Amino acid sequence: MVTTLAPPALTSLPPEEDLRPLADRAYERLREAIVEGILIPGAKLSERGLAAALGISAQPVREALRRLEAEGMVETRPRSGSFVAPLDTPRLVEMGRIRAALEGAAAGLAARRAGAADIAVLRSRLAAMRAATGTGDPAMLRRANEAFHDALHTIGGNAFLIRSLHALGAYDHIGRARALAAEDEPRQALDEHAAILDAIAARDAEAAEALMRAHTLRSLAVAFPEESRD
């Protein structure tokens, strides 16, 4: 299947709004298009077509597709090209449960290793989540949520755990987007992240791990209510 990319579904990247490398911006735009269903599972991805839609050259698009492939959101088929990966609901839930265990472990490690500067970073990320929750902007909220988790993973400092969570990126992004779209989820998620941060600040590794795991599993059930039932 070949997907046609037409404005405003996938618009060009404004040259002056963001100083990040084009590959990073293309990656984020394409990832959001997959998460939001603009690029549907099985859609063929043309580097040239994507580059034209984004108003950039093919090279940053190529780099973005490589990153998305590493996360499991894009797959390359020999002699056929690149496609949006098929991400069915049972698979998303299965990977979400694995992610819950890993996120819990990451929170426990962060509680053991966090210094005052690390806690300050997490508090600033939580403040960004609070601000995003107030706007009601799903994309902004999703980015703020991911930034909190990314900071927590970095504080934990376990390279293997970070790589494992990164490998679950496709499942994480889609599940998180679906959960945060639920009416009451953003506020509840904010409260749960605040409790996790309190446990990390108190150096209570067991509580941080348990709270994070419970939060991740509850959000998964919100995202996929039928499939998440035991």
Image (spheres, helix red, strand yellow):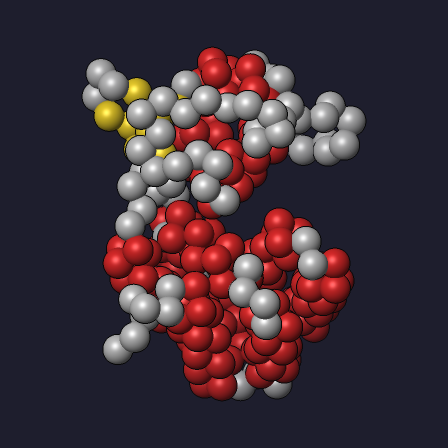
Above or below, comparing residue 151 to residue 43 in the picture: below
Asked whether the viewer can see residue 100, the reply is: no
Q: Where the C terminus falls, by quadrant? A: bottom left
Residue at the left extreme of this rendering: 78
Above or below, comparing residue 74 to residue 77 in the picture: below
What residue appears at the point 74 percent right and 58 percent down from the top-left corner? 135
Asked whether the viewer can see residue 76, the reply is: yes
What residue appears at the point 39 percent right and 60 percent down from the top-left corner? 161
On the rendered structure, is 107 left or right of 41?
right
Q: Residue 116 occupies which quadrant of the picture?
A: bottom right
Along the line of sight, the residue nearer the viewer: 181 or 198: 181
Residue at the right extreme of this rendering: 16
Q: Residue 57 occupies which quadrant of the picture?
A: top right
Above or below, comparing residue 21 to residue 183 in the picture: above
What residue appears at the point 55 percent right and 15 percent down from the top-left corner? 52
Q: Where the N terminus falls, by quadrant? A: top left
Count of residue discs:
0
Q: Position of residue 98 (x, y in %)?
A: 31, 65
Q: Position of residue 157 (x, y in %)?
A: 49, 61
Q: Residue 149 occupies which quadrant of the picture?
A: bottom right
Q: Position of residue 46 (x, y in %)?
A: 41, 18
What residue appears at the point 36 percent right and 34 percent down from the top-left corner? 84
Q: Position of residue 51 (x, y in %)?
A: 53, 18
On the rendered structure, is 25 left or right of 80?
right
